[in-house]
Image: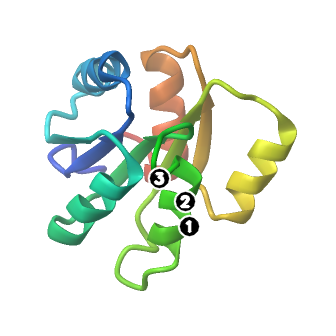
Amino acid sequence: MAVDKNMKVLIVDDYKTMLRILRNLLRQLGFNNVEEASDGAQALQQIGQHKFGLIVSDWNMEPMTGIQLLREVRGNAETKHIPFIMVTAESKSENVIAAKEAGVSNYIVKPFNAETLKAKMVSVLGEF
């Protein structure tokens, strides 16, 4: 089944520059239906209002972190199926393990480029 490039993608980061970078990388890959949230709480609100085909979230945010957001998404029957890619500057193995235990679909360590993002997206969504 082909990936719908018109699906809504939610990008979550408390750093405006990172949101812009993510939006540009997604655009390069053909995904233009992108919503933004600046923290986990704002993201949850949007997830409750829209159907997303993918969530790409930073780990380190206040007041609600990416891992807390992931746990909320996975704990809800209506959202637990949404592919979730975690972005972080930390490559510590305990973080990777915690994210996997919380049900992350894939993991990207900063800095990264469009190729890396595409590879991670293909691994969770299929070829596009």
Q: Residue at x 53, y 23 (%)?
A: 116
Give the distance between the C-alpha atoms of the residues marked 3 and 1, in whole angstroms.
11 Å
- Identify which amino acid the numbered label 2 is placed on: Gln
Give SS at disc 3.
Answer: loop
- Identify which amino acid the numbered label 1 is placed on: Arg
Q: Residue furthest bottom?
A: 77
Give the distance between the C-alpha atoms of the residues marked 2 and 3, in whole angstroms.
6 Å
Foreground label between 3 and 1: 3
Circles 3 and 1: CB distance less than 8 Å? no
> Which residue bears the numbered disc 1?
71
> Which residue bears the numbered disc 2?
68
- The spot of residue 21 in percent (x, y) is 33, 17
Q: Is residue 86 above or below residue 13?
A: below
- The spot of residue 128 in percent (x, y) is 35, 39
Circles 2 and 3: CB distance less than 8 Å? yes
Asked if residue 1 can be seen in this view, the reply is: no
- The spot of residue 3 in percent (x, y) is 30, 50
Give the distance between the C-alpha atoms of the residues marked 2 and 1, in whole angstroms.
5 Å
Q: How is the image coloured?
A: rainbow
Q: Dot 2, crowdedness within 10 Å: few (<14), some or many (≥20)?
A: some
- The spot of residue 40 in percent (x, y) is 40, 52
